[in-house]
Amino acid sequence: MNPIQGKHILLGVTGSIAAYKAVDLASKLAQAGAEVDVLLTEAATRFVSPLSFQSVTGRSAHTDAELWGAEAHVLHVNLGRPADLLLVAPVTANTIAKFAHGLADNLLSLTALSARCPLMIAPAMDGGMFSSIPNQENLHKLISRGVIVVGPEEGHLASGLSARGRMTEPGEILNRVRHLLARGGRLCGRKVIVTAGGTQEPLDPVRMLTNRSSGKQGFAITQAALDEGAEVTLIAGPVALESPCGAKRVDVKTAEEMRAAVLTEAAVSDALIMAAAVADFRPGDPAPRKLKKSAAPNSIRLERTQDILTAVSEAREKSGRPLMTIGFSAETEDLETNARKKLKAKGLDLIVANVVGRADSGFETETNRVTLFSADGSAEALPLMEKSQVAEAIIERVIVQFTKELGK
Ligand code: CTP
């Protein structure tokens, strides 16, 4: 499950022109299911109104006007205590300095001092201010205390100059929050490898054999494992998808490169989920130079690639790693017979079988209809689902397996 769901996030907003982007950030956090309480400094209210935040979070936004009100002596404590995260975006050099030195002269800095939850900050300021010695010293102080600093990025600044000082975009901050809040999930401390996408087998420097895999299912599994706090290595064929935040990505092209990468990682992993569509054949004699039309061959000799899961299964017999192996079975017919055969032959704990080539299931689609066959003989047919839901169902199986192992 998305780890932002149901979490209580305090969003501090300070006096930078990037404060207008904080409204979008608050909206994104609320849409992801968080309860968002916004605290604006006096300077922030000059750029953006508390009402804008109230409108997107559905909760009243707090300002220093409340500092001396009826609840004043406990407001900062009440805000800080239940929070899962204090996120300050944008954070100015002034507020960074206050945090570094423990100053408590407004509602936000008071709350930061009394809260015991993680603190994440997204600086936004002029490039010269950001790189200045006092600001850098303050940031180092905060980092050494475990504060997470996101950005800033290089780019166009309000001064008209281009330098490092732009606040990281709200979507990216949201990804960082998602990754942070997954800490302590049910796969915390577990190493998971996911493969995704198809492979490319060269015929010559410009042509290749490949397949229709989009990588979407493997990337969704990576996100689902990250959401449970796993450390994930994503071994991806050439696909045009952005890595989920927090994944270690290893890019490969050919089946042979994927095999080498998987075997290296599998030896130190808890689970392997092979969602990639690996080529079974490659051209036997790839040409070093582009094949000319005039000299085109009448046929192409193909040779078999090695089966990665079989190699993992052999290594696992000796090393015991990975503890759990999951394969996929993409079929156009005889789904159950073929899937069960592969489950056994490749020494898997679970196989995810799907019929490919339909409008709503398989390659290049947003949804999938799969059946999970287990090594113990059981089968579970899942209804048509978003690929993200299929991913969660697979990760749930990994969690169940590890919980069982711990109970032994
Ligand atoms: N696989 C693998 N190494 C290969 C080919 C496939 O590890 N060289 C993995 C896939 O990642 C998938 C599983 O094996 O998890 C089944 O892949 P699939 O293409 O359905 O089956 P194949 O074994 O290739 O058999 P066939 O193509 O004859 O159906």
Image (cartoon, rainbow, N blue to C red):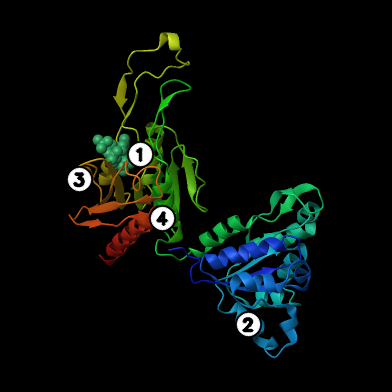
- Sequence-earlier tag: 4 or 3: 3
Q: Position of residue 334 (x, y in %)?
A: 19, 43
Marks 4 and 2 sit apart, C-alpha to C-alpha, by 38 Å
Type of amino acid at the residue the image marks with label 2 = Val
Q: Position of residue 397 (x, y in %)?
A: 31, 59
Q: Mark 2 near mark 1, Cβ–Cβ under 8 Å?
A: no
120 or 368, nearer to the observer: 368
Q: Residues within 10 Å of mark 1 (few under 14, many from 20)?
A: many
Type of amino acid at the residue the image marks with label 1 = Ala
Identified at 47% across, 65% down, the residue is: 3
Q: Secondary structure at mark 3?
A: helix
Q: Residues within 10 Å of mark 3 (few under 14, many from 20)?
A: some
Please indicate, yes or no, whether residue 276 appears anywhere in the rendered image. Answer: yes
The image's mark for residue 388 is: 4
> Which part of the image, by quadrant, shows the N terminus?
bottom left
Nearer the camera: disc 4 or disc 1: 4
Nearer the camera: disc 2 or disc 1: 1
Q: Which residue is mark 2?
A: 77
Marks 3 and 2 sit apart, C-alpha to C-alpha, by 58 Å
The image's mark for residue 277 is: 1
Marks 4 and 1 sit apart, C-alpha to C-alpha, by 18 Å
Type of amino acid at the residue the image marks with label 4 = Ser
- Sequence-earlier tag: 4 or 2: 2
The image's mark for residue 344 is: 3
- Sequence-earlier tag: 3 or 2: 2
